[in-house]
Amino acid sequence: MNQMEMMKAVAAMGDGTVKIVEVPKPDKVGPYDCLVRVTACGLCSSTDLKIIYNGSVAQNTITYPTLLGHEGVGVIEQVGEKVRYLKPGDRVTSPLGMLTPAPGYTQTYGGMNGYALTMDVKAMVEDGVKSPLFGMLDDPILDFPSRLIPEGMSDPDAVMLLTMKENYSALKNFGVHAGSRVLIFGDGAVALGLSCFARYLGAVNVTVVGHHDERLARIAELAKVDLTLNSKTESVEEKLAGQKFDVCVDAAGSPEIVLQGAKFLVPCGVVGVYGVLKRGHSTIDLLDLPNNVSVHILNWPYHEFRQHDEMLDMIEKGVVDPKWFYSHVMPIDEAQKGVDMIRNREAYKVIFTME
C-alpha cells in the first residue's frame, strides 16, 4: 500500500489561533482537473480573520478546525486527460482547496494549502459535463474563479488580483458611474481599492472615512480622493453637513455604518455593504433608515471574475498597481505572526509564500 503524500496547510483552530498542519496532498486528478502547486496566498482580513476569531463568516457558521485561504495563486503541475485549454506550467489564480478531502478538517475555502485543484471549465462546458460548483455561478465560463496569470507578474501581485477585481465589481454592482458621488467607510486595502476604482469609473466626489491618519493619508495620495476624515478625531456629521452622496460603501462590515452612511444619501441612494458582517452583529431596525434608500448586500458571486482582463489592462496602463494593496510578504510558517500583525494593525495586507 502506497503511503499517502502530505502537504502543508493553515488551519484555524477555533481558539483564535492558526496552526500549520499536514493534510493529504490530492492523489487523484479527474479528467477535467488540474493539479496546482500553490505558491502564495493572501490573508483576507474580511473573511479569514472572521473565520479565525468569530466562528462565522457571512451566512456560514464555522466548524473547527477548518482550513483557511481563498486568495491563492499557483502553477499547474498535472492535468487530466480531457483538459484542453490549460497546461502544465500555466500560472493561475484562485485554485480551490475545497475540492480536496482533508480528513479531520472542515474546509472554509481551504486554498492556503501546498496543493489545490482547478478545472478546465471551458472543456467541461463544451463536452456537456457539469459540476456542483456550476450551480453557484450565473455562467460557468465567465464566473469560474481561476484565471491565467500573465507572464512576468509576481506571485504577490497576482494574489491581489482577486481583491482588486472584487473592489471594482462591487462598485459596478452598487451603481457607481461617471458623475457619482461616493462615500466610503474604511481605511484598509479594500477602501483603497474602492477609492481608486470609484475615481476610475468617473466619480466626481470620493470621500473616505476611517480611523487611522496614516492609512487615510495613503489613500489620499494614491487614489486622489476629495476628502478623508478620521472619525475618531473629527465629527463626520459636522464635516459632511449639507453634502449628499449617491452611494455609500461599508468596507468595514458594521451595521452602524449602514445607518450612519444612509443619512448622507440622496433620494434613491444606495448603501453598499461590502465588508463581511459577522453573525449576531448584523441587525438593524429598518425604520431607522431614511426614506427612499436601498441597502445592497454583496455576497459571492457578483461577477468579479469577469473583470480579470479589464483589471490586467488597468495595471498595464498604470491606473493601479497591485503593490499598493499589500504591505508584507512572509513564509507560510509565520502564519500566526501574520494574523497577529493584521489584528494589531501592524500590517494592512499580508501575503504568505508557500515555498
Image (cartoon, rainbow, N blue to C red):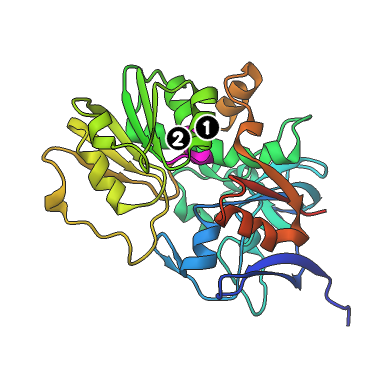
Residue count near mark 1 (Cα–Cα under 10 Å), binned few <14, some 14–19, many ≥20: some
Hey, which quadrant is residue 198 in on the image? top left
The location of residue 277, given as percent across then percent down, is: 38, 56
Q: In this view, does 112 lie to the left or right of 206?
A: right
Instruction: Please tell me how crowded label 2 is: few (under 14), some (14-19), or many (20+) other residues with Cα within 10 Å.
Output: many
Disc 2 marks which residue?
Answer: 169
1 or 2: tag closer to the N-terminus = 2
> Horizontal placement of 226 versus 21: left or right?
left
Callout 1: SS: helix
Residue 354: x and y, percent?
78, 54
Quadrant housing the N terminus: bottom right
State the extent of the magenta-drawn residues as a range. 186-194
**Image point (28%, 40%), residue name:** 271
Q: Distance between the residues labelled 1 and 2?
A: 7 Å
Residue 193: say if magenta: yes
Q: Looking at the image, is 29 positioned above or below residue 229?
A: below
Dominant SS of magenta comes to helix
187 in magenta? yes
Residue type at mark 2: give it.
Answer: Ser
Q: Quadrant of residue 262?
A: top left
Residue at 28 percent across and 37 percent down: it is 235
The correct choice, above or below, for 277 with respect to 63 in the image is above
Q: Which of 271 and 73 is in front in this view?
A: 271
Quick one: 277 or 342, which is closer to the camera? 342
Q: Where is residue 158 in the image (x, y as percent from the top left)?
A: 68, 38
Q: Tag 1: residue type?
A: Gln
Query: Could you say where residue 116 lies in the image, as x and y percent from the top left?
Result: 71, 58
Marks 1 and 2: CB-CB under 8 Å?
A: yes
Is label 2 in a helix, a strand or a loop? Answer: helix
Residue 307 disc label: 1
